[in-house]
Image: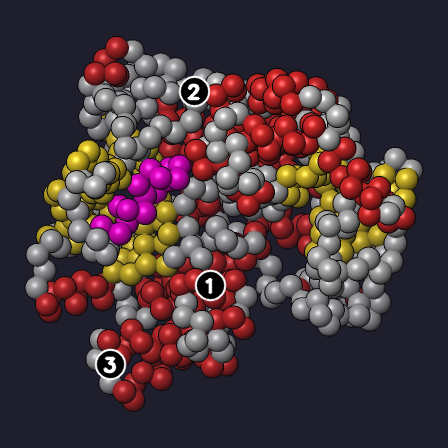
Amino acid sequence: MSLIRLLAENGTITNGSIHFEGKDVLGLSNKEMFKFRGKDIGMIFQNPLDSLNPVMMVGEQVSESLILDKISKEEAWKKVVELFEDVRIPDAKQRAESYPFELSGGMRQRVMISMMISRKPKLLIADEPTTALDVTIQAQILKIIKKLRDDFNLSILLITHNFGVVAEIADRVGVMYAGNLVELGDVYDIFEKPLHPYTRLLMKALPTISKKQGRLETIPGMVPNLINPPEGCRFENRCPKKIEKCKKIKPKLKKYQEGHYYNCHLEMS
Amino acid sequence: MQNNIIEVQNLKKYFKIEKGIIKKNIKYIKAVDGVSFVIKEKETVGLVGESGCGKTTLARVILKLIEPTENTVLFQGKDITNLKKEDLKNYKKNVNIVFQDPASSLNPRKTVRQILKRSLEVNEYQKDSMENTIIQILQKVELGTDFADRFPHHLSGGEQQRVSIARAIILKPKFVVLDEPTSALDLSIQAQILNLLLNLQEKENLTYLFITHDLDVVRYISDRIGVMYLGKLVEIGPSEEIYFRPKHPYTFGLMSSSPVTTPRERNKKRFELIGEIESIINPPKGCRLSGRCPFAKDICLLKEPKMIEIAKDHLVACHFVNELNLNK
């Protein structure tokens, strides 16, 4: 949300910077930001029904963003039908005249995706795009996202708590815990050579066995309250490998090898 | 040999939809349309299927929260349809449910103690033993006794779910339905709750019906898995068989679309069913999957397949179960 400057009013960016193609995003005026969103960065959310206008045909909603680029209504409508075909909506022409309630969850999410790629953004932020969908539909949507990524040279920031989705689609993975990035690396490294104690435990909590083969590992305790976060490492109270200084000193993100970073006091070898 | 605790016999539950002022055009949603299976004592049966396939409706009929349209359910060999007062009360004591969203299934204005006490009061527990029972049950779900005076909004999602579980088992039921109990939880909390459920099952001799659409979770926790599609049970069998060697095209499609567990498998070949789940109001005649199944032949459009036992405890409803080789 910080990235496209859509934070709630009580959220302010207190420190740091965001650069998009070398441009400082935080320095842009609201007017410039308006052009930047959608054009350069698109975003899709978890529940497409919340993002679509219930009393407007879906085709019309998608064409709105096209008309911003100063093309005629007829042309925009034609474009919408093409876009719907790109995201594999069957009977694209008729479906463009449907209202959101007439479509299934998977179809609605496709409409959202087509809306987001309509202006050919460079980056697509997808916040739990398949969480509300059944696995069969999830597989179809992931396939479409992968194809669009390759066809349109799209970069994707995918936010999810489903490791299966990560395993399917991600090139690199960032693991967050209580407001901190604790590990960042290639998807194979994260799954096969996790470094941070939190990532390691998460990998073992994944249900990849049957109960006859043993029990899942759990992470004891809970995420700390962020109103008064601990002064040291935020994972300290749950960490099985904590040492003396974890309580007092906050670790910094350090390099393990090219492209693989972790945020922990322990030295990994 | 384990005894059957629940026997579901050709169960049907239809919901009527009426249209127009004079209520002509009566149609039915056949949410559960002729489902038969048994659950044995101390066993966990997982129930999977896409949204709207009738999993939850089936569970609600078993719990006698709603009445079936046709046929019935046996609990320990006894028909639950026409239970009289005492027997009904006894039945409701023996079965219970944990829901998906703990926040909305716990009363926000009652403390954990009041929530747990309610079911004891209804069942006329001795006043002086109640407090003891509540403390014991909180320990069983691994919550400290200081949780008794907290309100649900003071608890995290995982703790709320523990309270829901405590409420479900406080009357020492024999059979518990778990309806997506971990879908709303984080991965690390999900593992805690799953392990807690397994421990409780061992200690309290519980039988579970575990409803979910997470196929990895259902494999971890279940002894057997049943797969539903548009109100029908299409396959049921030992969980590792269903997970690794499914025999029904629908199960195969479902397993194949489940996300991989490691990035190494991301380019594996997948089996895809055609299109999307069809309407349950006008389900296809014959096999319900016929419109989406790439192997469908004429007979599939005309005749509904029967459940066939292909191996011990493994039943499949497909005309071509012996001819298809899905796992290649």
Looking at marks 3 and 1 on the same chain, the residue that comes earlier in the sequence is marked by 1
Disc 1 residue type?
Ala
Looking at marks 1 and 2 on the same chain, the residue that comes earlier in the sequence is marked by 1
Q: Is residue A149 left or right of residue B127?
A: right
Chain letter of disc 1 in the image: B
Q: Is residue A148 left or right of residue B100?
A: right
Which residue matches tag 2? B274
> Distance from label 3 to label 1 (Cα)?
27 Å
Do the residues at discs 1 and 2 belong to one chain?
yes
Location of residue B238 (image quadrant): top left
> Distance from label 1 to label 2 (Cα)?
37 Å
Magenta run includes residue B56: yes
- Disc 1 crowd rating (10 Å Cα; few below 14, some 14-19, many 20+) is some
Disc 2 residue type?
Ile
Residue drawn where x is 59% and y is 39% of the image: A129
Chain letter of disc 2 in the image: B
- Disc 2 crowd rating (10 Å Cα; few below 14, some 14-19, many 20+) is few
Which residue matches tag 1? B103
Q: Which mark is residue B125?
A: 3
Magenta range: B47-62
